[in-house]
């Protein structure tokens, strides 16, 4: 996989288990946006699962973090 032709019929048969990440970083609903952003940046990941105990509560993406920064933090950069 990795750099292969997306039109390759074999790709349709490739199980996601072959390409998925096994080390999954998670957050809880109480994790601050700042902490989640730090973890995502330091680990070069674009999303984190949000879990409550053993239950999946949602997913946090890099876009979610950026949108929050733009909407809730007063920066002259956005003016």
Image (cartoon, grey):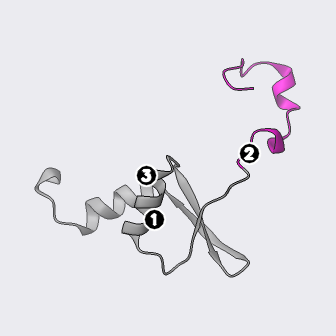
Name the spot of residue 6 as percent of width and height, x first.
71, 22
- The image quadrant that residue 75 belongs to is bottom left
Residue designated by label 1: 36
Q: Which residue occupies 75% across, 19% down?
A: 7
- Left or right placement of residue 22 versus residue 26 in this view: right
- Left or right placement of residue 29 versus residue 13 in this view: left
Q: Which residue occupies 53% across, 78% down?
A: 29
- The image quadrant that residue 23 belongs to is bottom right
Callout 1 crowding tier (Cα within 10 Å): few <14, some 14–19, many ≥20: many
For the residues carrying marks 3 and 2, which lies nearer the camera in this image? 3
Judging from the image, what secondary structure is the residue with disc 1 in?
helix
- Left or right placement of residue 70 versus residue 17 in this view: left
Question: Residues under labels 1 and 2: Cα distance?
Answer: 21 Å
Specify the label residue 20 is tagged with. 2
Q: Tell me if residue 78 comes above or below residue 14 in the rendering.
A: below
Name the spot of residue 4 as percent of width and height, x first.
71, 19
Q: Earlier in the sequence, mark 3 or mark 2?
A: 2
Residue designated by label 3: 41
Callout 3 crowding tier (Cα within 10 Å): few <14, some 14–19, many ≥20: few
């Amino acid at each position: 996989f990795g750099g292969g032709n997306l039109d390759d019929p074999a790709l349709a048969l490739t199980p996601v288990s072959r390409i998925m990440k096994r080390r999954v970083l998670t957050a809880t609903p109480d994790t601050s946006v700042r902490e989640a952003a730090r973890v995502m940046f330091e680990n070069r990941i674009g999303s984190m699962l949000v879990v409550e105990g053993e239950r999946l509560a949602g997913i946090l993406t890099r876009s979610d973090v950026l949108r929050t920064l733009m909407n809730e933090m007063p920066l002259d950069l956005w003016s």
